[in-house]
Image (cartoon, coloured by chain):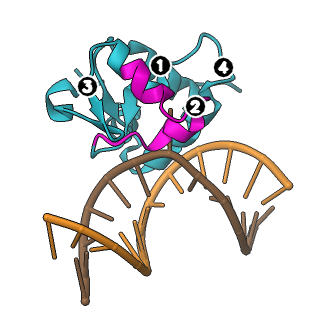
Chain colours: A cyan, B brown, C orange
Amino acid sequence: MNDENFFEKVYAIAREIPPGRVTTYGAIAEALGTKGSARMVGYAMNGSATVTPPVPAHRVVNRTGLLTGKRAFQGESLMAELLRNEGVEVINDQVVNFRHLFWNPLK
DNA sequence: TCCATGACTTCCG
DNA sequence: ACGGAAGCCATGG
């Protein structure tokens, strides 16, 4: 059981994301060793809201820096607001300078 | 065991 | 450059 559950791994990395930084599902999936399971990363994040300790899922976006998971949050713009609160500028659900704010879990 | 779904990613037109 | 379709992996029914 729980031998490094896939979800647990995703949560662990997501919690390691420093504030003011963002990462992509593919990067996390690659860090897990399953680069092809980028979709699973998002799938796991879907349950992150019910997991403890809470996971900063708002720091996780797709490879384009688009807030694809914003709909999973309570507010439609809550995810963008959370990122802005950390100093990340978000426009039209798109992270500005995403490439510069990108944080690599492998690093 | 097989089919269907999904906070993604990449390729083709 | 933009839009649509296919591919991959893990979970649930």
Reading the image, the residue beneath label 3 is: A89
Question: Mark 2 to mark 4: distance in Å?
Answer: 14 Å
Q: Are marks 1 and 2 in contact (CB under 8 Å)?
A: no
Image quadrant holding the N terminus of chain A, namely top right
Question: Which residue in the structure is indicated by mark 2?
Answer: A73
Whichever of labels 1 and 3 marks the residue nearer the N terminus, that label is: 1
Compared with B7, A61 (above or below) is above
What's the distance in space between the residues labelled 2 and 3, CA to CA?
18 Å
Residue drawn at x 41%, y 43% as measured from the top left? A34
Location of residue A65 (image quadrant): top left
Q: Do callouts 4 and 3 mark residues in contact (Cβ within 8 Å)? A: no
Residue found at x 27% / y 14%: A87
Cα–Cα span, label 1 and label 3: 17 Å
Disc 4 versus disc 3: distance between alpha carbons?
27 Å
Closer to viewer: mark 1 or mark 3: 3
Which residue does the numbered mark 4 point to in the structure image?
A51
Q: In the rendered structure, which segment of residues is drawn in magenta?
A: A65-83
The residue indicated by pointer 1 is: A56
Question: Residue A44: x percent and y percent?
Answer: 57, 35
Amino acid carrying label 3: it is: Glu
User: Whole-percent x and y of residue A91?
Assistant: 29, 36
Secondary structure under the numbered disc 2 in the rendered image: loop
Kind of residue at badge 2? Phe
- State the separation of the CA atoms marked 1 and 4: 11 Å
Are discs 4 and 3 located on one and the same chain? yes
Q: Can you tell which of label 2 and label 4 is closer to the viewer?
A: 2
